[in-house]
Each structure stands twice: as structure tokens, then as C-alpha cells.
């Protein structure tokens, strides 16, 4: 009856590169927010038109209060984000204009110099780790075998979405493979969003722009690249949030163990009555 | 252990771990050994970019239509140092650029002397380390022409720029910067005396600033008084090759 099967789900290389990537992306995100805070506005094009940003976080003084308010603009819209974005601090410590709160940046106080050292060091970790994963993924067939969805799977994407929406996850034979939504989201992150982070990051480098001017044409200018870097990072944050949520609701210990030891327990498929 | 216990344990564990990580990282940022390890990124990045970047590869040049209407002036924008004020009061007629150090022929050049030398005009993008960019038009004498005229010696490794402005308010440190020979002899590296067809304005470094188009803005010293050719940065101010470098920023600012 209760025939639990243990399979070897994740190859050692996948497990090691996964956790190195977790550390690298966490440091890159937090140090990236530190760097963003040095000029908390985004633009499209080659240059910054300071009075017409695509997005900005800043403080404005108000005549009736000592502290002013924090404002976030996005396109033509203006939001009061006092205490979260644009203006932080309190009456005791003093108010301060800043983008993101220092509680989510690295270091946790204003230091562009250290933020850049953290960012670029872990950018190298991320790139070397990512290259190892991709080269192995291609040569071992992992990407094609485990992540490339088949035409049949793509055809059934609707029912997979419906199953996920009801928090019903594959069991039995079906649970031995990634389902089509997993395959697509992992592929988009590994082959599109993460490489996009690297390329838009390099486009912000005046040295790389001189070596490969085509980078500027691909992304529409250095300031566009900076904005796309920010958007892409936001999408990765959303992916990670959903990923962690799915790990939690689909058997957190089983999932965590499989990404640490490789072993994953398959629950038997429910018998049809 | 029941699932609920595990879950609450996990939750508590995550809270403790993330607090330790967040707090720990601030602490880490001030540890000398962590700074040493993180600083290796500069060597890696510099080595990689030098390998990818041919010495003659030019930074993109833009058109008049791309010029920034409001080119941000950053750092020192109106130096109050007495000697500088005196020079500015006389529209820099008494200003002289000293070229010294490991050179066969030390020079002392007025603005007119520089204007009489060959010039290059370029419309380029200025990238600040803070993240913003502005586009400006610069005219000046190639640094290579000045160094050749001064008969720079063979053992020179760095060119140091000494500036008139005091940016370290508490310490009284004057701004200075340094570059390697790859950038010193790059065709777009010019000593600019004009910006957007006007005499270089004070907020942008009058009477002379350097343009180093393949690096970030803080390398491009303003208010230049003296250029020195040296074989080592050791013993110059904080020894790290620049005002911001002495305060933790990377010497190689190509990224």
C-alpha cells in the first residue's frame, strides 16, 4: 500500500551551484540596493535627464512638518512612501533622504565604496558559478533532459496551472520530473534573467562599453541598461519569493533535503477509486 | 517531531539566521581581512578588462543633439581655497600647469600654451560612480602630447594629477588622482579647457580637468594644478592613488 520511494533527484553539481547561487544573489541584491541608493532614480536612454526620471525615490520638504515626506515616482504617478522609500529615520535619529531602507542594504549604512566591493566580488562568484552550471548543464544533457519542456507538456500547461492554483502537486511517477511550470520558470531564470543581469551590469561599465559598444545598442544606452538591471533584479526577487513559497507548501523538508543530499521521497500516486 | 514543531523551529531558525547574516555582514564590512578578500575583485576586474579592452578602443562618441541640458557638477563645485580664488578672480591668466616628476624637461604651461598645442574635441558620456550619466562636449590637448613634450622617462608607471580643491573638509586633503599609462596615452584622454564650446566653467573644474573616457567620473580630476609622472603611488597622500581610493573606492574605475 504505502510504498514510499526514494529517488536521487539533484546531481551534486546542481546542489552545490544552487547554494552558491543563493549566497551570491542575496549579496548581489543587497549590495545592489546600496549602489542604487547612491542615486535613487532610474532613466531610459544614454543619459540621465534629472527632472524626468522613469522612477525615483526622494524626499521633499513640507512646510508644516520638520521631517518632510518620502516620495516615490513611477512614470507620471507619485506615491507617498514616507518611512519606506524616499525618506527614512525618526525624530530621535534624524530623518534622512534615501532610496531603500538601510535594513535591506549591504553594508547596512551608506557606503557606496563597500557596496561596490561586495557587489563586484560576488558578481565574479555568480559568473564563475553560473558558467560551471551552464557548461555542465549543456554537456551532461541536464538542461535538455530535465528542463526543456516537451511539446506535449506545453500543450497541457493550462491544466498544470489549474492544479498549482489548487495547491495540488504531482505524485507518483509525475513527481519524479519537474512539471512544465517549473521547467519554464527555471529556464527563464537560468537562461534569460540571470544572463540579462550580467549583460546589463556590464553595459554600465564604461570600460566594457568601449570594448563592446554593441552592448549600448542592445539595451538602448547605459541608463536603459541600469533600469533593465533593476527590473530584471525585481523579477528575480519575485521568482525567489514564489520559489520559496512553493518549496514551503509542497513539502519543505523533502524539498530541502533533496537540494542538500540529493534524496527525494516520492509519495505514491493516489489510487483511483 | 511533529510537522508543526518543525515548522516553527524552521521559522525561528530562519529569523535568527537572517538576523545573524544581516548584522554579521555590517560587522564583516569593517573587518580588514574581509576588505582584503573583497578588494581582490578590483584586480580580477582590471585584469579581465585590460585583456578585453584594446589600448586604442574608443569610448562611444555622441552627437550635439545628445548633449545634456543640465550636466550635473559633482564633488567640489566651487572651491574656496584662497590660492584658487585668486587665480579665478583673474580668470586664470596667472594659472600655470606644472608638469614634473620623472620627465626630462619639466614644464610650466599657461592656458594659452595649452591652447596652442594640438587639440581634440569629443562628445562623450560621463558616468558617475553614483549611477547617473551626462553627455558633454570637451575640447583639450591630448595628455600624450604634454607627456611627450615633457620627455617622459621610460620607468614611469603612473601619471598623478594634483588639484586645487580641498574636498576632505575635516582632514584638509586636496583632491588628487592617478592613472596608468594605458589610459594616459589613450587618444581620448585629454586635458580639457573647454566644455560645450565655452571656457571650462568652475563647477566642472576650471581651468583644466582631465577626461578619461573609459573610466568613471571620480578618475577625471578637476582644477588640475600639477601633473607628476611617477614610478610608484607609494608615499603619495594615502598611497592608494587618489582621494576616493584613499577612502575605500577602487583605483581601477572601468566598472
Image (cartoon, rainbow, N blue to C red):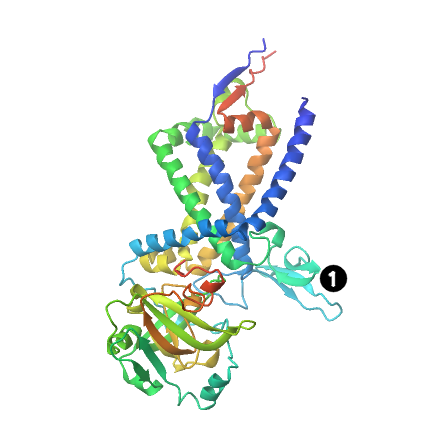
Instruction: Point out the image quarter for the N terminus of chain A.
Output: top right
Residue positioned 63% across, 43% down in the render: B19
Taking the view exactly as shown, the residue that stands out farthest to the right is A64
Out of A127 and B62, give the one closest to the viewer. A127
Image position, residue A7 (x, y; %): 48, 19
Task: Answer left or right for A69 relative to B107.
Answer: right
Please give the residue where the numbered disc 1 appears in the rendered image.
A91
Residue sticking out furthest to the front: B235
- Residue A79, position in %: x, y? 65, 58
Q: Determine the image quadrant of residue A46.
A: bottom left
Q: Residue at x 55, y 68 (%)?
A: A51
Q: Position of residue B98 (x, y in %)?
A: 35, 81
Q: Is residue A251 visible?
A: no
Q: Is residue B154 left or right of residue A51?
A: left
Residue A12's quadrant in the figure? Answer: top left
Q: Could you tell whether A209 is left or right of A50 in the image?
A: left
Does residue B86 lie above or below B190 as drawn?
A: below
- Counting the numbered discs, the total is 1
The image shows residue A104 at horizontal and vertical percentages of 60, 50
Q: Disc 1: which chain?
A: A
Amino acid at each position: 500500500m504505502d510504498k514510499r520511494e526514494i529517488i536521487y533527484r539533484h546531481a551534486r553539481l546542481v546542489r552545490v551551484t544552487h547554494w552558491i547561487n543563493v549566497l551570491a544573489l542575496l549579496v548581489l541584491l543587497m549590495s545592489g540596493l546600496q549602489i542604487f541608493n547612491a542615486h535613487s532614480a532610474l532613466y531610459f536612454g544614454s543619459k540621465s535627464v534629472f527632472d524626468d526620471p522613469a522612477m525615483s525615490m526622494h524626499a521633499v520638504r513640507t512646510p508644516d512638518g520638520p521631517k518632510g515626506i518620502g516620495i516615490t515616482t513611477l512614470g507620471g504617478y507619485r506615491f507617498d512612501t514616507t518611512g519606506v522609500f524616499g525618506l527614512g529615520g525618526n525624530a530621535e535619529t534624524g530623518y534622512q533622504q534615501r532610496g531603500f531602507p538601510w535594513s535591506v542594504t549591504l553594508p547596512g549604512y551608506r557606503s557606496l565604496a563597500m557596496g561596490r566591493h561586495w557587489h563586484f566580488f560576488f558578481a565574479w562568484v555568480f559568473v564563475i558559478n553560473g558558467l560551471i552550471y551552464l557548461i555542465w548543464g549543456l554537456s551532461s544533457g541536464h538542461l535538455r533532459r530535465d528542463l526543456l519542456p516537451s511539446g506535449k507538456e506545453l500543450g497541457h500547461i493550462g491544466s498544470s496551472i489549474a492544479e498549482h492554483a489548487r495547491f495540488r502537486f504531482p505524485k507518483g511517477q509525475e513527481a519524479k520530473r519537474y512539471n512544465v511550470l517549473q521547467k519554464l520558470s527555471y529556464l527563464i531564470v537560468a537562461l534569460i534573467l540571470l544572463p540579462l543581469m550580467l549583460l546589463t551590469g556590464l553595459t554600465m561599465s564604461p570600460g566594457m562599453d568601449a570594448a563592446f559598444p554593441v552592448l549600448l545598442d542592445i539595451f538602448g544606452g547605459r541608463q536603459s541598461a541600469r533600469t533593465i538591471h533593476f527590473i530584471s533584479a525585481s523579477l528575480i526577487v519575485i521568482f525567489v519569493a514564489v520559489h520559496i513559497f512553493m518549496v514551503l507548501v509542497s513539502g519543505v523538508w523533502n524539498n530541502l533535503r533533496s537540494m542538500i543530499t540529493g534524496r527525494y521521497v516520492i509519495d505514491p500516486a493516489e489510487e483511483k477509486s | 517531531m511533529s510537522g508543526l514543531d518543525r515548522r516553527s523551529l524552521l521559522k525561528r531558525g530562519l529569523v535568527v539566521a537572517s538576523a545573524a547574516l544581516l548584522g554579521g555582514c555590517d560587522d564583516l564590512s569593517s573587518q580588514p581581512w574581509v576588505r582584503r578578500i573583497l578588494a581582490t575583485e578590483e584586480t580580477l576586474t582590471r585584469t579581465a578588462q585590460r585583456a578585453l579592452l584594446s589600448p586604442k578602443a574608443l569610448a562611444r562618441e555622441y552627437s550635439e543633439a545628445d548633449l545634456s541640458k543640465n550636466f550635473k557638477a559633482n564633488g567640489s563645485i566651487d572651491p574656496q581655497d584662497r590660492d584658487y580664488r585668486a587665480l579665478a578672480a583673474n580668470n586664470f591668466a596667472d594659472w600655470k600647469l606644472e608638469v614634473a616628476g620623472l620627465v626630462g624637461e619639466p614644464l610650466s604651461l599657461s592656458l594659452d600654451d595649452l591652447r596652442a598645442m594640438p587639440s581634440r574635441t569629443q562628445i562623450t558620456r560621463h558616468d558617475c560612480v553614483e549611477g547617473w550619466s551626462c553627455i558633454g562636449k570637451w575640447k583639450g590637448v591630448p595628455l600624450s602630447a604634454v607627456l611627450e613634450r615633457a620627455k617622459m622617462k621610460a620607468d614611469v608607471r603612473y601619471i598623478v594629477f594634483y588639484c586645487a580643491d580641498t574636498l576632505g573638509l575635516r582632514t584638509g586633503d586636496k583632491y588628487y588622482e592617478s592613472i596608468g599609462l594605458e589610459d594616459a596615452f589613450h587618444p581620448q584622454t585629454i586635458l580639457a579647457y573647454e566644455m560645450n564650446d565655452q571656457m571650462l566653467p568652475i563647477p566642472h573644474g576650471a581651468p583644466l580637468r582631465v577626461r578619461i573616457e573609459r573610466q568613471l567620473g571620480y578618475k577625471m580630476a578637476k582644477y588640475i594644478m600639477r601633473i607628476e609622472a611617477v614610478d610608484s603611488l607609494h608615499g603619495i597622500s594615502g598611497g592608494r592613488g587618489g582621494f576616493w581610493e584613499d577612502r575605500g573606492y577602487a583605483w581601477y574605475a572601468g566598472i
